[in-house]
Image (cartoon, rainbow, N blue to C red):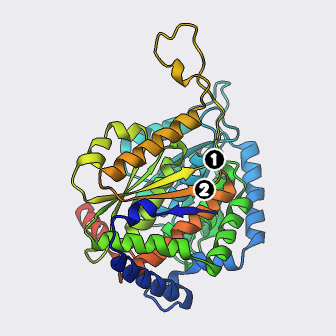
Amino acid sequence: MVDCNIENARTFIDEDEFQNSRTKAEQALQQLKSRTGPGSEWLGWRDILVDPNDAELEQISSLAARIRDEADIFVVCGIGGSYLGAKAIIEALSPHFNGKGPEILYAGHHMGGHYLEQLLDYLKAPKEDGTPKNIYLNVISKSGSTLETALSFRMIREVLEDLYSEEAKEHIICTTGEEGGILNELIKEKGYQKFIIPDDVGGRYSVLTPVGLVPIAVAGVDIRTLFYGAVSAFNTYEEDAESILDYAALRHAVHKSGKTIDVFATFEPELTSLGGWIQQLLGESEGKEGKGIFPTVATYSTDLHSLGQFIQQGKRSLMETFIIVEKPFSNLKVNQLPKDNDNLNYLSGKSFHEINTKAREGTIEAHVEGNVPVVQISIKALNAESLGNLIYFFELLTGIFVYSLGVNPFNQPGVEDYKKAMYRLLGK
């Protein structure tokens, strides 16, 4: 299960203030459980764990196995919660180089024409043996009208129709709402395969629905283990949510004290995209009504050479949350050289995991001494089960913390503001 250590951060908070915040967190948890808080119609991310849809997990796994056997490329077309969760799990659990299965590519997550043009050219280009690439596309959009995703889908769909003619429908998988929307009209017209996004699950909470599970399964991850890791966390925290309540209370007290930034940091490059998922989950949930702690992401030790100076000695407006994997997932050790001409033989025989761990411990020590409240969130190992635990940990934490601020965690009214201005300027 997930371990949450707030000991270093507690020293920055008055005890009475913490206890007041703890009371608010407990009240917020009861709002979630009793469905009495604002936005309670969006609590489907809890319901899917109460009653797992094993038939859907099997259907997705079966389709993914076939795609992995056939495809050269699998394109995930979506933005925000429609791709961030999948990308986080895929990058955490996939090899950096020479992985098996199709190449996973992303589209529809911005409107950069240069990127899309090169992607289209890459999809059209034949393989080295002169045969066409075998391409599958998963478009993910509840409404089907999100501009970034819809534009990319239009362009990529044309490539697939040129390549496969009538058979293009066999290469396109749509994940969308049960009814309504432009994408459902295309599904009816073209006969695309469809997976349903539950009506009561918002995008940033949707990684454990077909939104995330289809791409994750195509990448070769055991989605049943991932999903049931989250189920295990759900069951645990229904009985004992003390660690999450403490973390939510700490964030509330830190927020009240004037901290405005939370740096989600990791020393594991595999977890960088997980930070991106957490960033959206919290940022889009708490950033309303002039409230919230701005979540940002850092990958150490790389970003210690760019952000480290500010974190250590800049304006004291931030806290820091470390995401830690306890068990080594590499046995690489530093070699011994006959001539110590780079002065590194003092590290010979040590594993890179040990060196990285000491770097993390030293960083935490320095940052705490620099008056940064530091929280440590740890999982035992980097695997599907632990990541399932972690997904639900942060989903529940988000609901509790944001309710404790007196804010609806499940809407995003500000997102619509930029869309209105954009569409007006585009002439819609």
Upstream in the sequence, badge 1 or badge 2? 1
**Rendered position, 49 above or below 314:** below
In 3D space, how far apart are the residues under numbered discs 1 and 2 (Cα atoms)? 14 Å
Residue occupying image coordinates x 64% and y 62%: 388
**Rendered position, 255 above or below 370:** below
Q: Position of residue 165 (x, y in %)?
A: 64, 48
Identify residue type, mark 2.
Answer: Ile
Residue occupying image coordinates x 36% and y 75%: 15
Residue 116 in view here: no
**Rendered position, 304 above or below 408:** above
Q: Which mark is residue 102?
A: none
Identify residue type, mark 1.
Answer: Leu
Q: Nearer the viewer, residue 232 or 93?
A: 232
Q: Nearer the viewer, residue 121 or 241?
A: 241
Q: Nearer the viewer, residue 320 or 137?
A: 320
Q: Position of residue 311 (x, y in %)?
A: 30, 48
Q: Is residue 303 left or right of residue 378?
A: left
Query: Could you say whether the residue bearing mark 1 is in a helix, strand or loop?
Result: helix
Q: Position of residue 269 (x, y in %)?
A: 51, 42
Crowding near the residue tagged with mark 2, few <14, some 14–19, many ≥20 C-alpha atoms within 10 Å: many
Whether tag 1 and tag 2 are in contact, CB under 8 A, the answer is no
Q: Is residue 111 left or right of residue 5?
A: left
**Which residue is label 2 attached to?**
379
Please identify, in this view, whether the residue under mark 1 or under mark 2 is nearer the observer.
2
**Which residue is label 1 attached to?**
93
Q: Position of residue 23 (x, y in %)?
A: 43, 85
Query: Could you say whether the residue bearing mark 2 is in a helix, strand or loop?
Result: strand
Q: Is residue 104 left or right of residue 344?
A: right
Crowding near the residue tagged with mark 1, few <14, some 14–19, many ≥20 C-alpha atoms within 10 Å: some
Residue 52 in view here: yes
